[in-house]
Amino acid sequence: RIWSKYSVLRKWTIDDALIIATMFLGSTMTATISMTVTNGLGQLQSSLSNHQIIEFQKYGYASQLLYIPALCLTKLTTLVYLRALSPESHFETMNTLLEVFIIIWGLGAEFAIVFQCQLPSPWAIISGKCFNTAAFWKANGAFDILTDVLIVFLPLYLVWPLHMPWKRKGIVVMAFGSRVLVIPFTAWRINSLSKTNSRDQTHSLYHGYLTTSIQLNIAIFMSCVSFLRPFLESMVSGGMATTVHSMNASYAKSSKLSSLFSTRSGRSEPQGSTMKPPYRMENLS
């Protein structure tokens, strides 16, 4: 994703840093889940030693702490890029509100995970006294699905009024709306975690950790789809190829892709609304 985007836009931007952080967190989470397998994940709890159970709990706790920020960053990396593409104030407001909502949700969920069990052993999901984690992960999954639906809606709102062929609109929506494919995996994860047997968590949590790893990695992959070279070249080629001088600080001058969204239709702005400085374009088609 990073190389294909740079080869077209010739610029590193904040969303590139976000996806690098996401991949690091995702890889580290996968490593911690591997350590839970080493310490008894998938095995009967009665067959494990006390040391294995303690290590299992600690690595499981670490994987949960890594999961939330990685998941939120997969969403933010797409939103940050979408926000930089359009100067339209309504779109920017919706995008920013969704970013803030995801950040608040992520911080709240992370705080809840940190203190899910009584101190001094907040990691003791088996041996400690904890809140209702099943209900927590169901609620967290609902927020996850809701934010994905809203992210899919944003590119629809963005391209619907544009003066461009329907085929090209479809390409944009398909690229930026690919997160809709994450939703079934999120539902699968929620269902797997809801079937956890509290009397034998090391055995019953196997599918929960498996679906968590799959869902997060699918989310990371889908956040990269819109930056694959075929999509980028398709959006900046042909009749939409323009020379743009953007005033957006996130994407400096000559950003070809942002020109795609500067050719807006007559979506009216109410009086008193603020707009980013306009794009100065020379249409080459």
Image (spheres, rainbow, N blue to C red):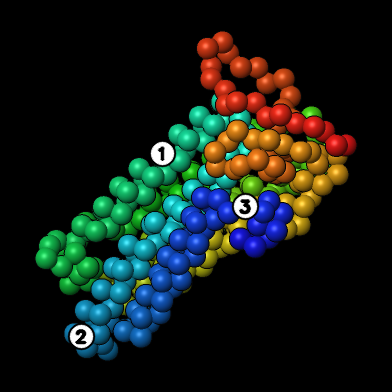
Mark earlier in primary sequence (2, 1): 2
Q: Where, quadrant-wise, is the N terminus in this rendering?
A: bottom right
Whether residue 34 is visible here, answered yes or no, is yes
SS class of the residue under badge 2? helix
| Tag of residue 213 | none
Q: Position of residue 27 (x, y in %)?
A: 46, 71
Q: Where, quadrant-wise, is the C terminus in this rendering?
A: top right
Residue that label 3 marks: 11
Residue pictured at 82% horizontal, 47% vertical: 237
Instruction: Tell me the amino acid under the disc marked 1.
Output: Val
| Tag of residue 100 | 1
Q: Is residue 23 left or right of residue 38?
A: right
Instruction: Tell me the amino acid under the disc marked 3.
Output: Lys
SS class of the residue under badge 1? helix
Residue pictured at 68% horizontal, 43% vertical: 255
Q: CA distance from mark 1 to mark 3?
A: 26 Å
> Could you classify mark 3 by the number of other residues whose Cα lies within 10 Å: few (under 14), some (14-19), or many (20 or more)?
some
> Could you classify mark 1 by the number of other residues whose Cα lies within 10 Å: few (under 14), some (14-19), or many (20 or more)?
few
SS class of the residue under badge 3? loop
Instruction: Tell me the amino acid under the disc marked 2.
Output: His
Q: Position of residue 103 (x, y in %)?
A: 39, 45
For the image, the number of numbered tags is 3
Q: CA distance from mark 2 to mark 1?
A: 41 Å
Is residue 46 placed above or below 117 in the rendered structure? Answer: below
Is residue 61 placed above or below 271 in the rendered structure? Answer: below
Q: Residue furthest right?
A: 285
Q: Position of residue 224 (x, y in %)?
A: 61, 58
**Closer mark to the observer between disc 1 and disc 3:** 3
> Could you classify mark 2 by the number of other residues whose Cα lies within 10 Å: few (under 14), some (14-19), or many (20 or more)?
few
Whether residue 181 is visible here, answered yes or no, is no
Residue that label 2 marks: 51
